[in-house]
Image (cartoon, helix red, strand yellow):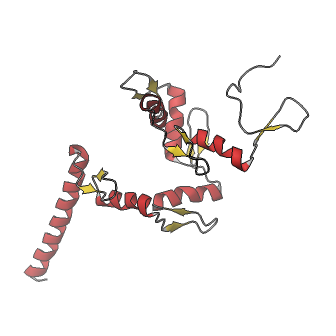
Amino acid sequence: MSFNWIFINWHFISCYFNTFYATHLRTHTGEKRFQCNICGTTFIHRSTLTYHLRIHTGEKPFHCNVCGRTFTVKGALTSHLKTHTGQKPFQCNVCQAVFRLKRNLTRHLSTHTGEKRFYCNICEATFAHKSNLTNHLRTHTGEKPYQCHMCQSTFARKSNLNIHLRIYTREKPFHCTMCEASRVFGRESSNSNTNIL
């Protein structure tokens, strides 16, 4: 084994780990060196920028062989495939509920602990889930990022847009469970826990 070969391999390995270490350090310093040339958003990792750019280009290179749905990142496809297999490998050790994704189990666990880690810095309201805080913040900012492609109405929550879209699809997925009539409704009662005497 020649000295040159050992030196080249050592140099390669050294550079690789130094680069990896430098990239890792950016997670602590918050340095975001990679910027989207379309919207200006910045990222710590080049790979994250690559995924982000697919939002603008519409590129979805990962395809589900079962239903044909496409995804921007491989992890999303992997998670999606579990919808076809019915696989739910993550189980709550408190109530035995099962989940397809680990993040859904993590989110569920806060229902048992009552922990509310996310708080509004404007009114100090607290939330168990980051998505609930994000939705709440829109009550302060007035932001309505979800837009109807039919009438251009905007909504703060995606769920409200989905309810609105039923005007056009005429979908009525909710049935009355109290009467024999086959009445159906476009939205579920917001007070579904009301006891009827």
Extreme-bottom residue of the structure: 2
Q: Residue furthest top?
A: 197
Q: Is residue 106 left or right of residue 169?
A: left
Residue name at image x 76 percent, y 19 percent? 195
Locate residue 16 relative to residue 144 in the image: left or right. left
Residue 93 vertical position relative to residue 112 in the rendered view, above or below: below
Q: What residue sits 50% from the left and 24% below the top?
A: 114
| Vertical side of 159 occupied by 85: above or below | below
Q: Residue furthest front?
A: 151
Query: Residue, x 22% and y 50% (percent of image)?
Result: 26
Residue 58, image x, y percentages: 47, 63
Q: Where the C terminus falls, by quadrant?
A: top right
Residue 188 coordinates in the image, percent (x, y): 71, 34
- Name the image quarter holding residue 66: bottom right
> Is 81 in front, or is 12?
81
Whole-percent x, y for residue 115 in the image: 46, 26
Residue in the picture at 83% in, 32% down: 177
The quarter of the displayed image where residue 183 is located: top right
Relative depth, front residue between 116 and 144:
144
Quick one: 147 or 100, which is closer to the camera?
A: 147
